Image (tube, grey):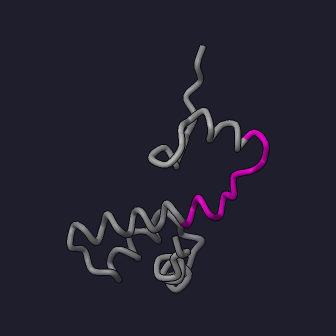
Amino acid sequence: MNKKIDNPLSELISDEIYETLESRGLINKKSVRDYMIRKRFDTLRQKEISAGDAIEKIQEDYPYLQFDSIRKIIYNRPSS
């Protein structure tokens, strides 16, 4: 029986690779969270939602993060 895993990086890596990395403690949860926040922000902005409103919507999903913390995550993107 194949169990379905929650792979928030499915567009970047396969479920199998994610599961292997996670089982070995090699997934940085904060980095994954930040990636998901940036992805959601980009999606909201494509829908022509203002940056401030987009951050407020994201804050609903991450109530433990302050507005400025989310803003820093979004605008301080790692260089590629």
**Residue found at x 62% / y 41%:** 18
Q: Quadrant of residue 22?
A: top right
In the foreground, 19 or 40: 19
Vertical comparison of 1 with 74: above or below: above
**Residue found at x 53% / y 77%:** 73
**Residue found at x 52% / y 49%:** 9
Q: How many marks?
A: 0
- The magenta segment: 23-34
Which quadrant of the figure contains the N terminus?
top right
The furthest residue to the right = 24
Q: Residue 40 in the image: state x and y as whole percent.
A: 39, 63
Q: Residue 78 in the image: state x and y as whole percent.
A: 55, 74
The furthest residue to the bottom = 68
Q: Quadrant of residue 28?
A: bottom right
Q: Residue 41 in the image: state x and y as whole percent.
A: 38, 69
**Residue found at x 28% / y 72%:** 45
Q: Residue 57 in the image: state x and y as whole percent.
A: 38, 69
Q: Would you say residue 22 sits in the magenta stretch?
A: no
The furthest residue to the front = 80
Q: Quadrant of residue 66?
A: bottom right
The furthest residue to the top = 1
In the foreground, 10 or 47: 10
Vertical comparison of 63 with 10: above or below: below
